[in-house]
């Protein structure tokens, strides 16, 4: 049976992970824009990978379900890399919650029904989830376990509570890591694993937009005072993704791994700490 690796989001991070874990396997590369999927597929095909493409809107159950059906027609789904999302500079709070929070929960639920024994998933969250003040135990449980179709109806996610795109992004990314922890229980019953990576500033087109956008000076300051003193590269995320999806990561599931060069440490306990 052919092993299928599904990549949602054709950007640099998804590509970096898939290059590490997909030799000899079938890659299904999905993006909301067909031209993005095609461009990434050409790069991967030219490097020797077997790639087919699809379009997907992660905020639509019908669209995600169609992607699952396309994947299972190709073979056995042994890996899922969920790297699609929108940033605070790109969208409204409502769109961020729909794509980043609801969309991730939907992908985890739908692919959790078909993931193969021994399979693994990685969700790309963000350091932003680590800069949200602690939530209550009840709020954590609601973000982790509320049925997908009821998620956006939670009182804590309404416009009177979420007033700006950055807050929407932070709570979405915190929600991603909590949802992955809960889903790891369900995936575990199928003999599969799933984890979150929370990258800091990784040089991608999206990050370049942020560095040039209204929050640019703040992002540049983050890099200056962090322990690493620089941004990360997609390849560094790829290395961690390969660990989490491969045999060396077989004891890791339901975890969230922060890789941000020390920015969050500086935010809570260093020069970036709120005065």
Image: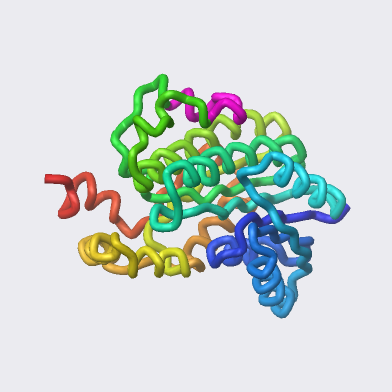
Q: Which residue is depicted at the point 40% across and 38% down?
A: 171
Residue 4 horizontal/vertical position (percent): 77, 55
Closer to the camera in the image, 109 or 189: 109
Question: Residue 20 vs residue 272: left or right?
Answer: right
Question: Residue 42 vs residue 13: left or right?
Answer: right
Q: Which residue is depicted at the point 78% across and 61% down?
A: 26
Instruction: Characterize the magenta stretch by its predominant secondary structure.
Output: helix
Q: Which residue is depicted at the point 79% across and 51% down?
A: 71
What residue range appears in magenta?
140-151
Q: Quadrant of the C terminus?
A: top left
- Furthest toward the top, the residue is 138
Q: Which residue is depicted at the point 35% across and 23% down?
A: 136
Question: Residue 26 vs residue 29: left or right?
Answer: right
Residue 251 visible within the image: no
Closer to the camera in the image, 134 or 101: 101
Question: Residue 74 vs residue 119: left or right?
Answer: right
């Amino acid at each position: 049976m052919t092993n299928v690796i599904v990549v949602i989001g054709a950007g640099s991070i998804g590509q970096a992970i898939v290059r590490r874990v997909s030799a000899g396997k079938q890659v299904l590369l999905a993006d909301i824009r067909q031209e993005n999927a095609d461009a990434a597929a050409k790069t991967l095909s030219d490097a020797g990978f077997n790639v087919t493409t699809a379009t997907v809107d992660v905020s639509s159950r019908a669209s995600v379900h169609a992607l699952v059906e396309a994947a299972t027609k190709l073979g056995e789904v042994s890996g899922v890399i969920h790297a699609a999302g929108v940033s605070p500079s790109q969208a409204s709070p409502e769109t961020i919650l729909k794509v980043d929070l609801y969309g991730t929960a939907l992908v985890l639920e739908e692919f959790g029904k078909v993931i193969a024994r021994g399979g693994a998933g990685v969700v790309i969250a963000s350091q932003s989830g680590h800069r949200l003040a602690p939530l209550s135990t009840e709020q954590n449980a609601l973000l982790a376990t509320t049925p997908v179709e009821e998620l956006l109806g939670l009182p804590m996610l309404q416009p009177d509570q979420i007033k700006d795109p950055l807050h929407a992004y932070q709570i979405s990314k915190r929600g991603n890591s909590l949802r992955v922890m809960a889903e790891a229980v369900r995936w575990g019953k199928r003999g599969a694993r799933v984890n979150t990576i929370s990258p800091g500033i990784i040089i991608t087109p999206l990050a370049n937009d942020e560095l040039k956008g209204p929050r640019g000076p703040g992002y540049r300051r983050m890099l200056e005072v962090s322990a690493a003193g620089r941004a990360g590269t997609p390849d560094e995320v790829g290395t961690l993704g390969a660990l989490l999806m491969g045999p060396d990561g077989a004891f890791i599931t339901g975890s969230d791994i922060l890789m941000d060069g020390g920015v969050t440490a500086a935010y809570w306990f260093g020069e970036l700490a709120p005065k």
